[in-house]
Image: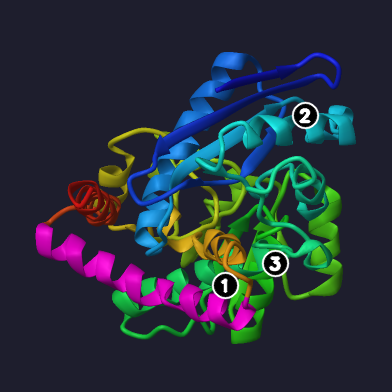
Amino acid sequence: MLCQDRASGLKAVIALHSTALGPALGGTRFYPYANEAEAVADALNLARGMSYKNAMAGLDHGGGKAVIIGDPEQIKSEELLLAYGRFVASLGGRYVTACDVGTYVADMDVVARECRWTTGRSPENGGAGDSSVLTSFGVYQGMRAAAQHLWGDPTLRDRTVGIAGVGKVGHHLVEHLLAEGAHVVVTDVRKDVVRTITERHPSVVAVADTDALIRVENLDIYAPCALGGALNDDTVPVLTAKVVCGAANNQLAHPGVEKDLADRGILYAPDYVVNAGGVIQVADELHGFDFDRCKAKASKIYDTTLAIFARAKEDGIPPAAAADRIAEQRMAEARSRR
């Protein structure tokens, strides 16, 4: 669905990939795409990822995603968000929206004024608040599962973890890792964000950019927590980490990268599995939010990730392919029951 409101300057794309398991659920990304075609492609890829994410998280939701075209620092306004809310509402509940890159709890409060199918709202407005808290917790559980599978022990103490992107999710992940005694290396395009992290935690090491981060000597785990496509033909050959487990969506730049990782002996924790904590939280909001219930569900990401690694070994395929098979099976079973 292409959305345009000239009065507010809104240009957006809403993509629905599947409703086999229930109404499509996925966030709203606000980003300065180079052109409309790039925005449509991103929305379609993200919506597909949400179908698989929701299926693997055991949620009764299909996959959808929306992108608003433009620099949120320049064009975001109350009028634009209200106009966007009207477009989401016009779908009559087939799509439930939430926060994503470039959108925040306060934005969802505005969208919700025009659309009741809005999650990620503030507690004051009946919502669950910041979903990045449980997103980071889920990624942390995925890291623990990878450590258990690869090294026979889930602890991350004394492991070196490199985080690319220490924004909404990444800075919470830093806290989890430091609390367990891990060594943390970070980078972010926003130098002020990095400075905040290193001033708060002097033990955290900052490097210039992602290119430097993936080459850090003795790196155990690489956590892409910014935008997608982090694993590609340029980065995989030089990656020093033994595990990739991060919060970014669509980390594999193209089909075949998952095999390249496996061929190098790098264990990949599928992104849409380990970053599902946020969607678990916002889905719960539709039924009366309970944080402890959500955290208990998010903690199961550890078991789900281990099961994927086991399935991958059994079938002789990369973990990403194993996760796809499990998700596709659940969606197919739902369609057959209709």
Q: Name the amino acid, label 3.
A: Ala
Q: Position of residue 213 (x, y in %)?
A: 59, 52
Work out whether residue 250 can be spotted.
Answer: no
Position of 108 with respect to 19 (left or right) is right
Q: Residues within 10 Å of mark 1 (few under 14, many from 20)?
A: many
Q: Name the amino acid, label 1.
A: Phe
Nearer the observer: mark 2 or 3; the answer is 2
Give the residue drawn at x 59%, y 85%.
Answer: 180
Q: Is residue 292 shown in magenta?
A: yes
What is the distance, in whole Å, between disc 1 and disc 2 at their CAs? 33 Å
Up/down of 101 relative to 196, above or below? above
Residue hosting label 1:
137
Q: Nearest the camera: 156 or 250? A: 250
Residue hosting label 2:
83
Up/down of 205 relative to 237, above or below? below
Label 2 residue SS = helix
Please tell me the numbered disc located at residue 128: 3
Q: Quadrant of the N terminus?
A: top right
Label 3 residue SS = loop
Marks 1/2 in contact by CB < 8 Å: the verdict is no
Q: Quadrant of residue 330?
A: bottom left
Looking at the rendering, the stretch of residues picked out in magenta corresponds to 290-315
Q: Name the amino acid, label 2.
A: Ala
Give the residue drawn at x 75%, y 25%.
Answer: 70
